[in-house]
Image (cartoon, rainbow, N blue to C red):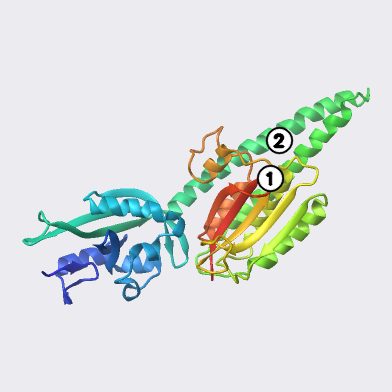
Amino acid sequence: MARETVDGRVDGEPVSDRYRHLIEHVQDAVVEFGLVDGEPVVVGVNRAFVDVFGYEADEIRGESLNEWVVPDWKLAEAEDLDANTASGEVNYRQVTRETATGLREFLYRGVPYAVSEGGEGGEGDLDGGFAVYTDLTEVSRNERRLEVLNRVLRHNLRNNANIVAGHTTRLLAELDDQGSETTDVAATIERAAHELERLAEEAGHIRRVLEHPTDEATDIDPEPIVRSVVDDHRGRAPSAALEVEVSDVGSVMADSRLRYAIDSLVDNAIEHNPRSEPRVRLRIGGAENPPDAASGEWVAIHVEDDGPRIPAAERDVILDGSEITPTHHGSGLGLWLTELTVETFGGELSFGASDLGGNDVSIRLRRS
């Protein structure tokens, strides 16, 4: 039987103008797929898909849709959606998908169709469907960026300013007596002042990240950045033991602002570790299996430590698993700086456990 495809043909001949006109002028990316053993195989795509995902129609036609657009670590989620499609369900879900320039966020709608001997739309077996992707990347990022700057910056600057003001009053009252608490009070003021300085620095980095989004692909070798960050922290924290392990991974899709993300993770690993000699290990390797293979399309930069685990509430709010509220937004700008920088490059931030006994915070970036 004749079969219509979203690239505008029926068995090699043009479909009716009304359907071709509709599909080709829909601004959302649309893929028609056939189900082969439960897996979606691309039949055709519209122009918006080519523009958004960066894959040409002839390049992806006849290929597994999941192999092209689903990151390895999201495959189980995609297979669940495919199973729903195969059972006749319409899917709606916000998803992360892989494009030619990195990860982007989409509203995914999967619409199955059936083919029977009498034609499409009958009581026949499920044969395929349409995948519609609405790009939510910039909307989601802008919303969360505004929340971060509004909640975190105001909250932390206000709290630390209050600490400085309150302890300065106590210090001035006790200076005449040279009481026993004078030294402790002065030390508290010093720590709060340094924290204010760090917040101001991180806020400046965030501004530079947000003001100059990466619209075109750029590439950079992460190894010199990692080694430079390590050298800086060896000078600033000589008691810390910093190690570097690098595979031959080449360049990644990022620019010099990647330093902000790596520096922030190393700073957190040292500052929040109560050990007298905190240990931090930076590793660069492939992001596919095995985890350190210098192959595949993705590169992972790991910052590991032997300190206390990052609280679940801190991780959840960074990874969108928890709502940002006036009292629940994370304790500082460091992790937010890393997350905003990484997502600018179409990458992903993740949290795990290290064999050092502490955290393994990793940055995934697409290989150039």
The residue lying toward the viewer, choosing from 24 and 349, is 349
- Answer with the quarter of the image where residue 258 lies: bottom right
Residue drawn at (62%, 50%) of the image: 360
Name the residue carrying label 2: 160
Name the residue carrying label 1: 199
Query: Would you say residue 80 is visible in this rendering?
Result: yes
The answer to whether marks 1 and 2 mark residues whose Cβ atoms lie closer than 8 Å is yes
- Answer with the quarter of the image where residue 313 lies: top right
Outermost residue on the left side: it is 118
The residue lying toward the viewer, choosing from 219 and 216, is 219
Task: Give x and y (percent) for residue 45.
Answer: 29, 67
Task: Give x and y (percent) for residue 200.
Answer: 69, 47
Task: Give x and y (percent) for residue 215.
Answer: 50, 65
In which quadrant is the C terminus drawn?
Answer: bottom right
SS for dot 1: helix
Left or right: residue 107 compared with residue 355: left
Q: Which mark is residue 122?
A: none
The residue lying toward the viewer, choosing from 127 and 349, is 127
In which quadrant is the N terminus drawn?
Answer: bottom left
SS for dot 2: helix
- Answer with the quarter of the image where residue 292 lies: bottom right
Query: Would you say residue 261 is visible in this rendering?
Result: no
**What amino acid does circle 2 point to?**
Asn
Distance in Å between CA atoms under marks 1 and 2: 10 Å
Task: Give x and y (percent) for residue 309.
Answer: 63, 41
**What amino acid does circle 1 point to?**
Leu
Earlier-in-chain disc, 1 versus 2: 2
Residue drawn at (62%, 41%) of the image: 310
269 shown above or below 19: above
Residue drawn at (51%, 38%) of the image: 324
Left or right: residue 180 compared with residue 5: right
The residue lying toward the viewer, choosing from 277 and 48, is 277
